[in-house]
């Protein structure tokens, strides 16, 4: 009965995992039996010493064998548990122990049994152990307590010691047993947890714990302070509730992706506090994996780095920007230039470096003072910036020197246009307080990779070019290389020549006959522009039309072409029985705002000269239709109303689509020469002709040079042909003679 009670007490104290109820029971039974026998044996032996009879020796032998048996059982039992075990008599003498206990003392059982603690333990322990054991025996109650013990090898460990009395069959206590468990690891772990909890609560780092679905389980006080939210407000929510919107969804997706792949992410994140304020934090996200290989959750550790960022930003700005104008400084310009050079290499295009020097700035600074000079520089910076694109870089090199990097230059004219614009803007008056000041600028232009391939070289050559501009009288730009300079001057000269060409009547038209395939008669002619340059001779359209388009001169030139062509068209149409049409090329520029006014003038011209509209065909390119806005619709409609026809030139070279041809009323399609000249394109030609006919369009084939091509086109059902095979472009008078002769002959 006593045993069962004790067994339950022990079990409660030591925890369920130690031993089940019944085994405790039998264990204690065994202990009491054994030590009871041992005790009796000792009593008998003592008697035997006195009596020393044979009978008694026999009885003693019997008893001893029973005791041996129980001892063996007990040993095997006590050695099967990992905890240390010992038994003592009421007067504190060791009666037995298990292997674990032996190891804890570094002694064997034979050295231990029969001894007391006083002989085995260190002096300081003896006393405390004696006090506890006295209490156990006096109260008849087991006691559990923790003891830190030093191993013989010097290592420390923590024991959870249970001491309990054991009883004889008569229910009287025989002594006490001790069972001790090494809980060093558990204690250390608990200590760690305690420390971690302390850290968690008191650290300045924000911590946030989520479950595997990224739902917030816990935040620490630092996190609450940083975000302005209490735990109750965020529990169960997703940490993306803190997103500031400065970083896009893909950024957060990348974090999760990285954590799910390598279990870890760190970086900088912009969050929003409860009060709406945005702050920067440096964050580490860690995945928590269980021993089962499953994700148990995520821990995010972060610190507020807003102030640090602001400070860094300030330092960075001071190092890289000019404080007066806010523009990048020389250092930043170098960096940017290097970057742009790499970009240009990759895109296989050029970049331009403009060095701008304000003329006579020093005088202004000296006469009006530095403060006024500063205001002028700020305003100059603003004006220069306004002349460039977002992607260009404007920098201040110091003093009155500015630079502009024009990235991705595909058209060198663009560079000059910008340089000219800057010069113009800077030449406008500066209102500085009460005084109005005038400055001008000299600009040096250098190109990468044409002029130089290194940052330093580029800066130097831009500088040299700028001095050339200054020498030439300031308020102008200059290119670095002689070659480029010559080409640029050439262009400028050609442009200025072009302007006088109109006034000086240097243009004339050639007409290339267009033949009706069915009859072999010339039914149309295309007007092609020629420029009789006073010194260069005949200049072909490909050499000056692009310049005319860039400068807008094409509008004026186009007007002249139209009137000239219409004049002849009217004449030829009059005397030829079947009528006659002249095709006039029109540039896309003529359909833009600056050219649109001409259309009405043309129509008036036809009316005034009694020329029927139907003898004019306007040739436009696909691009005009593709970028068609209402204005183009309007213009084409006006042409139609005036009886004029429209042809699509160079068909097939642009974004060819029959789809949009349908939307406009087009009469003719001119197949581009690239289709005619490559015989393998026969099938394509056929297809275009078939499609065009389906849409009610007639087809003209251009640049037919060979009989074979003509035959192919005939077979394919082409309506008109034009090309060197029939005639080169010729003068109006020549065509006139042919037509009259032919007309007379018919
Ligand atoms: P385009 O409209 O495609 O004109 C056809 C070009 O092919 C003309 O070159 C013509 O001389 C040439 N050509 C004619 N037959 C043959 C041939 O059998 N073989 C070869 N290889 N070429 C042939 P051109 O006269 O030098 O004109 C070039 C371009 O200039 C024209 O191409 C047109 O786009 C433009 N252009 C000409 N005159 C004017 C004009 O008055 N105004 C506008 N805006 N552009 C014009
Ligand atoms: Ca044409
Ligand atoms: Ca053409």
Image: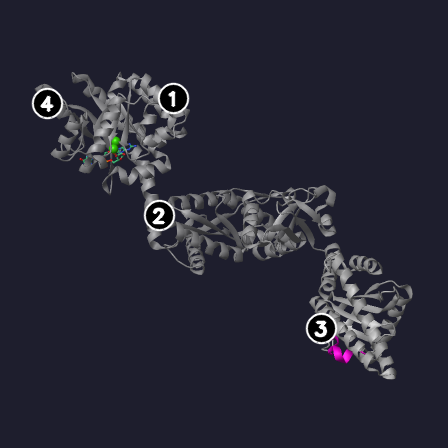
Q: Main secondary structure of the magenta part?
A: helix
Query: How many angstroms separate mark 2 from mark 3 (CA)?
Result: 103 Å
Considering depth in this image, is 571 or 330 the residue closer to the camera? 330
Residue at image point 79% right, 64% down: 29
Q: Is mark 1 on a helix, strand or loop?
A: helix
In the drawing, what numbered circle is on residue 505?
none
How packed mark 2 is, by other alpha carbons closer than 10 Å (few <14, some 14-19, many 20 or more), is some
**Which residue was labeled with disc 2?**
488
Provide the residue span drawn in magenta: 99-114
User: In front of the other: label 3 or label 4?
Assistant: 3
State yes or no: residue 72 in magenta.
no
User: In front of the other: label 2 or label 3?
Assistant: 3
Q: Can residue 542 be seen in this view?
A: yes
Q: Is residue 123 visible?
A: no
In the drawing, what numbered circle is on residue 99?
3
Q: What element carries label 2?
A: helix
Quarter of the image with the C terminus is top left
User: In front of the other: label 1 or label 2?
Assistant: 1
Query: How many angstroms separate mark 3 from mark 4 (CA)?
Result: 135 Å
Q: In this view, does 391 lie above or below 366?
A: above
Query: How many angstroms separate mark 1 from mark 2 (CA)?
Result: 38 Å
**Which residue was labeled with disc 1?**
634
* Position of residue 567 measured from the top left corner of the image (x, y, whole percent): 24, 22
**Which residue was labeled with disc 4?**
741
State yes or no: residue 102 in magenta.
yes
* Position of residue 285 measured from the top left corner of the image (x, y, whole percent): 61, 53
Q: Which of marks 1 and 4 is nearer the N terminus?
A: 1
Q: Which of marks 2 and 3 is nearer the N terminus?
A: 3
Q: In this view, does 431 lie to the left or right of 80?
A: left
* Position of residue 420 measured from the top left corner of the image (x, y, whole percent): 44, 44
């Amino acid at each position: 009965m006593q045993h069962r009670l004790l067994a339950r007490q022990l079990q409660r104290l030591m925890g369920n995992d130690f031993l089940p109820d019944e085994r405790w029971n039998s264990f204690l039974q065994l202990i009491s039996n054994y030590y009871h026998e041992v005790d009796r044996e000792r009593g008998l032996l003592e008697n035997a010493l006195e009596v020393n009879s044979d009978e008694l020796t026999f009885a003693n032998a019997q008893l001893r064998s029973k005791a041996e048996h129980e001892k063996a059982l007990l040993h095997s039992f006590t050695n099967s548990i990992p905890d240390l075990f010992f038994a003592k008599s009421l007067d504190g003498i060791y009666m037995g122990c298990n292997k674990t206990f032996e190891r804890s003392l570094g002694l064997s059982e034979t050295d231990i049994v029969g001894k007391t603690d006083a002989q085995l333990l260190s002096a300081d322990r003896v006393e405390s152990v004696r006090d506890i054991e006295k209490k156990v025996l006096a109260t008849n109650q087991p006691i559990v307590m923790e003891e830190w013990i030093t191993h013989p090898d010097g290592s420390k460990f923590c024991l959870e010691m249970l001491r309990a009395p054991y009883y004889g069959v008569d229910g009287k206590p025989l002594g006490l047993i001790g069972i001790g468990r090494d809980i060093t690891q558990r204690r250390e772990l608990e200590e760690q947890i305690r420390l971690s909890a302390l850290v968690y609560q008191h650290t300045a780092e924000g911590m946030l714990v989520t479950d595997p679905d990224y739902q917030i389980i816990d935040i620490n006080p630092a996190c609450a302070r940083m975000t302005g939210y209490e735990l109750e407000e965020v529990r169960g929510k997703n940490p993306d509730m803190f997103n500031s919107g400065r970083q896009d969804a893909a950024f957060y997706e990348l974090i999760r992706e990285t954590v799910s792949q390598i279990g870890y992410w760190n970086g900088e994140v912009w969050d929003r506090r409860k009060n709406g304020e945005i702050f920067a934090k440096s964050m580490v996200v860690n995945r928590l994996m269980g021993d089962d290989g499953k994700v148990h959750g995520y821990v995010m550790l972060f610190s507020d780095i807003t102030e640090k960022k602001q400070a860094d930003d300030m330092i960075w700005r001071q190092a890289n920007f000019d404080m007066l104008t806010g523009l990048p400084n020389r250092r930043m310009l170098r960096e940017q230039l290097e970057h742009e050079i790499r970009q240009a290499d990759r895109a296989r295009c050029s970049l331009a470096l403009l060095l701008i020097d304000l003329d006579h700035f020093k005088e202004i600074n000296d006469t009006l003072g530095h403060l006024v000079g500063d205001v002028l520089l700020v305003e100059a910076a603003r004006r220069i910036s306004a002349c460039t694109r977002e992607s260009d870089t404007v920098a201040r090199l110091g003093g009155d020197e500015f630079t502009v990097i024009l990235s991705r230059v595909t058209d060198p004219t663009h560079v000059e246009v910008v340089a000219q614009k800057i010069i113009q803007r800077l030449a406008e008056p500066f209102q500085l307080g009460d005084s109005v000041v005038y400055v001008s600028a000299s600009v040096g232009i250098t190109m990468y990779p044409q002029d130089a391939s290194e940052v330093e070289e580029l800066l130097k050559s831009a500088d040299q070019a700028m001095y050339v501009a200054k020498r030439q009288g300031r308020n102008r730009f200059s290119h670095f290389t002689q070659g480029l300079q010559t080409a640029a001057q050439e262009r400028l000269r050609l442009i200025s020549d072009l302007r006088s060409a109109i006034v000086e009547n240097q243009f004339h038209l050639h007409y290339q006959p267009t033949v009706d395939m069915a009859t072999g008669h010339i039914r149309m002619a295309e007007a092609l522009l020629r420029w009789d340059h006073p010194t260069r001779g005949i200049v072909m359209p490909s050499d000056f039309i692009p310049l005319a388009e860039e400068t807008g001169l094409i509008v004026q030139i186009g007007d002249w072409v139209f009137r000239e062509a219409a004049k002849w068209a009217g004449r030829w149409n009059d005397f030829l029985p079947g009528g006659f049409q002249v095709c006039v090329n029109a540039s896309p520029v003529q359909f833009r705002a600056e050219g649109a006014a001409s259309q009405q003038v043309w129509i008036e011209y036809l009316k005034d000269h009694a020329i029927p509209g139907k003898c004019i065909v306007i040739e436009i390119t696909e691009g005009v239709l593709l970028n068609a806005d209402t204005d183009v619709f309007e213009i084409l409609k006006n042409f139609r109303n005036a009886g004029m026809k429209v042809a699509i030139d160079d068909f097939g070279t642009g974004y060819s689509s029959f789809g949009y041809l349908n939307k406009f009323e087009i009469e003719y399609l001119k197949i581009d020469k690239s289709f005619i000249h490559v015989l393998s394109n026969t099938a394509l030609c056929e297809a275009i002709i078939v499609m065009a006919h389906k849409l009610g369009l007639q087809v003209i084939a251009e640049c037919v040079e060979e009989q074979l091509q003509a035959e192919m086109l005939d077979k394919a059902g082409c309506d008109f042909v034009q090309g060197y095979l029939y005639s080169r472009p010729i003068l109006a008078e020549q065509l006139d003679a042919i037509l009259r002769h032919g007309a007379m002959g018919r």
